[in-house]
Amino acid sequence: MQTVQQISVFVANKAGRLAFITNCLAAAKVNIRAMFMADTTDYGIFRLIVNDSETAEKALTRAGLTASITEVIGIKVEDKPGALAEAVSLLSDADISVDYMYAYNTPNSGSASIFLHVSDNEAACQVLEKGGVRLISQDEIK
């Protein structure tokens, strides 16, 4: 099974918190590759794919933040209409639910990188690989 480590950080919904978090990561020489923020009125969850998840988690917890590492799946899809639909249809057809996802795209590269949190990582990896979807390795993040 090929997964990628994601950092999840609990964030109070107040001015300056994202600056504090990103400055902690910068001081630890951690590079952010992709990110997603989900929020409510009082707090948010800041999810990040970084080049060094263990260093990131340590830096954030030392700074007094609640941070954890979660395994997610990273996939590469062609930068064309329908490519994401094909990948998530493979999961849907296998009755694997996608809890959330986020992406980054570099248009000149011809592909998009998408990170998914799913109900069953192992089954999802098998289904996606069998369907011809390229998985992203942790080494590619560094």
Image: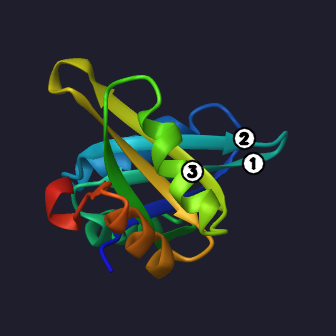
**Residue at x-position 85% and y-position 39%:** 41
Up-down: is 118 above or below 108? below
How far is mark 3 from mark 2, CA to CA?
35 Å
Indicate the position of residue 125 as horizontal and vertical percent values: 40, 71
Residue 16 location, quadrant:
top right
For marks 3 and 2 on the same chain, the one whose residue lies earlier in the sequence: 2
Q: Are marks 3 and 2 in contact (CB under 8 Å)?
A: no
For the rendered model, the colour scheme is rainbow
Observer able to see residue 50: yes
For badge 1, the amino acid type reads: Tyr
Observer able to see residue 65: no
* Image side of residue 53 versus residue 98, left or right: left
Look at the numbered disc 2 and give the secondary structure of its residue: loop
**Residue at x-position 14% and y-position 64%:** 139
Q: Which residue is mark 2?
A: 13
Q: Are marks 1 and 3 in contact (CB under 8 Å)?
A: no
For badge 3, the amino acid type reads: Ser
Q: Are marks 2 and 1 in contact (CB under 8 Å)?
A: yes
**Residue at x-position 17% and y-position 18%:** 108
Tell me the quarter of the image containing the C terminus: bottom left
Look at the numbered disc 3 and give the secondary structure of its residue: helix
Q: Which mark is residue 89?
A: 3
Q: Which mark is residue 43?
A: 1
Indicate the position of residue 44 as horizontal and vertical percent values: 69, 47
